[in-house]
Image (cartoon, rainbow, N blue to C red):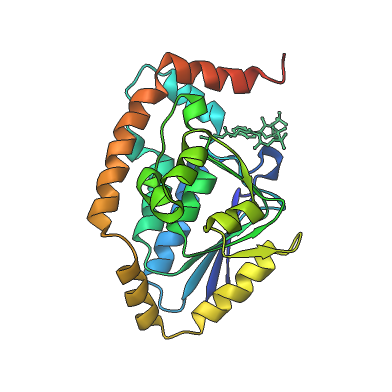
């Protein structure tokens, strides 16, 4: 069974992460599958909006930490820019179609970073957003050090991005990056309704407006690259390797 499911419902492409037994932790293969489904929609005039969804209980628990551990201890310098995570985030960044996220559960690390590249976010109250990068010895990714303070203000972004505080769907709605709080189990259905509403709008006008509303792509790409340089260096740091090991060993303790 594939860990990423893709279906088109009329003019809406729905991309579903499907590795519930690991809380949708993202492998390299999953990143590339999602990026492929995003990219192939770009030139497809029949697709007017894209929904990215997880499973009840898990949008995604972020990068697979066993993969991080393997990459960090390989002895090779890791460039974040060539990783699966960066491939996915770049695919979100360059996608001209409106992106709607449906979150019903944990959205950790890149799961939260992705929100800042989406145009509309639906989440249940029980959802949990967290960016534990710093606690793992890492740094923000995907230009979130630029986009999150811009969206939430510096202090709120510091609390989430640096201190790693977790927030639920309602708090995220209050903070401003969740548009709509869905009833339990309804995130994907509500996201689909929103996506159909967007898909019914004139597509050229939507595409131009989306482009105008976003920061210049060069500015975002520059921050992306700078974070990637630090991220790659930190991946091999003793503090990061010790944190990955701590997570992977926790159930054996
Ligand atoms: N990488 C690899 N495996 C992961 C994972 C990750 N990021 N997140 C969860 N899993 C696995 C767990 O190891 C467990 O597998 P097992 O049943 O084979 O032991 C399974 O998914 C279920 O996770 P569990 O921790 O039991 O679920 P939970 O509901 O108690 O907690 C989380 C969910 C997301 C809060 C917790 O799993 C967690 O903190 N994960 C790490 C998140 C993270 O740091 N991501 C990287 C960000 S940069």
Residue 99 sits above or below residue 239 on the image: below
Residue 220 image position (x, y, % from top left): 29, 51
The quarter of the displayed image where residue 238 is located: top left
Residue 129 sits above or below residue 44 on the image: above
Q: Quadrant of ligand 1?
A: top right
Residue 34 image position (x, y, % from top left): 49, 53
Residue 89 image position (x, y, % from top left): 41, 49
**What residue is rendered at 33% in x and 37% in y?**
227
- Quadrant, the C terminus: top right
**What residue is rendered at 57% in x and 78% in y?**
196
Residue 176 relative to residue 193: left or right: left
Residue found farthest to the front? 155
Nearer to the camera, 60 or 182: 182
Nearer to the camera, 233 or 121: 121
Residue 109 sits above or below residue 41 on the image: above
**What residue is rendered at 55% in x and 27% in y?**
66
The quarter of the displayed image where residue 184 is located: bottom right
Residue 29 relative to residue 169: left or right: left
Nearer to the camera, 35 or 231: 231
Is residue 102 in sight in this rendering? yes
Is residue 10 in sight in this rendering? no
The quarter of the displayed image where residue 45 is located: bottom left
């Amino acid at each position: 069974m594939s860990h990423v499911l893709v279906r088109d419902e009329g003019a809406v492409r729905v991309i579903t992460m499907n590795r519930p037994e690991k809380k949708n932790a993202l492998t390299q293969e999953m990143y590339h599958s999602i990026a492929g489904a995003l990219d192939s929609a770009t030139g497809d005039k029949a697709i007017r909006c894209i929904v990215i969804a997880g499973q009840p209980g898990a949008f995604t628990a972020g990068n697979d930490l066993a993969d991080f551990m393997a990459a960090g201890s390989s002895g090779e310098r890791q460039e974040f820019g060539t990783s699966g995570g960066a491939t996915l985030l770049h695919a979100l960044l360059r996608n001209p179609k409106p992106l709607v996220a449906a979150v019903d559960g944990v959205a950790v690390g890149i799961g939260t970073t992705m929100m800042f590249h989406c145009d509309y976010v639906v989440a249940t109250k029980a959802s949990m957003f967290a960016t534990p990068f710093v606690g793992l010895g890492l740094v923000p990714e995907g230009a979130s050090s630029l986009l999150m303070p811009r969206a939430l203000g510096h202090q709120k972004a510091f609390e989430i991005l640096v201190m790693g505080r977790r927030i639920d769907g309602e708090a995220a709605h209050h903070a401003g990056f969740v548009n709509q709080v869905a009833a339990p189990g309804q995130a994907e259905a509500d996201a689909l309704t929103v996506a159909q509403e967007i898909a019914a709008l004139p597509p050229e006008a939507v595409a131009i407006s989306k482009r105008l509303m976003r920061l210049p792509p060069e500015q975002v790409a520059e921050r992306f690259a700078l974070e990637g340089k630090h991220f790659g260096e930190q991946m091999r740091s003793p503090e990061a390797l010790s944190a990955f090991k701590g997570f992977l060993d926790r159930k054996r303790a």
